[in-house]
Amino acid sequence: MESAHENAIKQLEQVKNHVKANTEEFEKLKQHDRVLSQTIEIEMDDGTSHEFLAFRAQHNDALGPYKGGIRFHSGVSEDEVKALSMWMTWKCAIVGVPFGGGKGGIVVDPKTLSEEELERLARAYVRAFANDIGPWKDVPAPDVNTNAKVMGWMLAEYEKTVGVHAPGVLTGKPLELGGSRGREQATGLGGVYVLEQWAKKKGLLPGKTTIAVQGWGNVGYWFAYFANRAGFKVVAVSDSQGGVYVPKGLDPRITMECKQEKGQVSGCYCVGSVCDVKNGSKITNEELLALKVDVVVPAALESVIIGENASQIQAKQILEMANGPVTAEAEEMLTKKGIVVIPDVLANSGGVATSYFEWVQNNMGYYWEETEVFTKLKKLMEAAFTSVYEIHQEKKLSMRLAAYVLGINRVVEAMKARR
Ligand code: NAD
């Protein structure tokens, strides 16, 4: 199997003849500006010390400071951060925010650490890379197993190290430390803005458009919530324990309340840890993906629609809200069946768009109401969708390759303008 970085390079090669880059510029796109690695050492609770391998990859900053999350996971590797930082370059350019691509991580299983050890590790990471990040240099954010609390520790450590307040060095912070209103909902809401545009183009009436959502975390829940508010019919949702199928449509807010109350809400039907009103039935994650609905929305993990199950997909469109949920092999099979994949680099870019809004607010020291954030988010998402769709139509490329062409051309234009 290809590594993530090999896959990223392969995707780049697929659009080679559609982007406005000469050979030298195209070769440059394949290279990273910097891939940094450090061994960081922290004291454990029992007084011993332990070393961890940490990375920060900086792919291309033609459009602005590098931007991308920091992940704490045992599977983190140099190959992975290289691929993810390259994808961030394209994603930022597609949604039209002035950032380049970055990504970082530590090889660690955070479940094996106490909260105090985790904090020491987060702070040590920032000390190790303090010269390489900064509001105008490289702006990290949360990723797998990191969250607003971790960003708070990292911000405090960075400011202590450099001796000034610099809230724009990281995004995804707690509100009290300069986080943006609306950031929590932004990825899901951004995906709904994209879906609404797609529905308009394809003549799908929201009330008659059925949706199945895999994943009931930040992205899956808020996507389902706003899709329901926009009039779409969310008929199935799931989490890692399994899901619920309610053919007449479910109300995500009640489903969430029901889950939190462990099925104690009146009339609530509860399976696994996802619940809803009666008339629902239990469903597995595999069954959810294969439901006869209009749109399947994988919003949990990567590689859930793969060669083995692609032939079972009955939906006519897949909206990728997770990162990388459809493998290249599966996408080829889906395309042959006429199933359209609306790619992650467009569909879930509302997250990085709102990180950009957070950074803007931090740098000017002036904070916006949630409605202002959402209005700005809608404008960016709709503009990105329109541009990708035009390329998709004009060049007869898949939505994924059309999105890459848009993003890569914007990066190349910036590279040319700097020469
Ligand atoms: P999260 O941890 O809040 O939620 C993940 C959800 O997936 C949980 O409900 C969990 O139960 C479910 N899940 C785990 N294993 C599963 C399985 N085997 N089958 C079905 N469901 C399973 O994470 P999140 O922030 O919602 O991120 C989800 C995806 O979206 C990830 O791929 C992430 O990289 C991507 N993403 C997130 C953001 C963001 O702003 N949070 C932005 C862009 C992309």
Image (cartoon, helix red, strand yellow):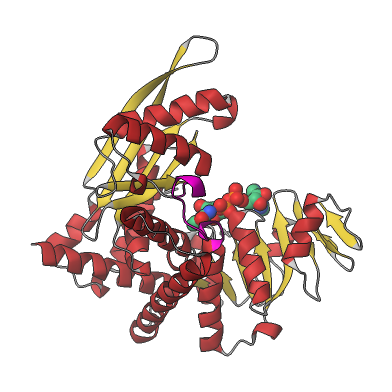
91 vs 293, nearest the viewer: 91
Q: Which residue is the extreme one toward the left?
A: 419
Against 39, residue 394 (above or below) is below
Q: Which residue is the extreme one toward the front?
A: 366
Q: Position of residue 206 (x, y in %)?
A: 65, 83
Residues shaded magenta: 172-185
Q: Quadrant of residue 391?
A: bottom left
Horizontal side of residue 261 vs 53, given as left or right? right
- Residue at left offset 31%, top offset 43%: 57
The reply to whether the magenta stretch includes residue 110 is: no
Horizontal side of residue 350 vs 88, given as left or right? right
- Residue at left offset 29%, top offset 62%: 98
229 vs 209, nearest the viewer: 229
- Residue at left offset 55%, top offset 80%: 196
Q: Is residue 339 visible?
A: no
Q: Position of residue 10 (x, y in %)?
A: 33, 58
Q: Position of residue 214 (x, y in %)?
A: 66, 60
Q: How many marks?
A: 0
168 vs 141, nearest the viewer: 168
The reply to whether the magenta stretch includes residue 175 is: yes
Against 33, residue 280 (above or below) is below
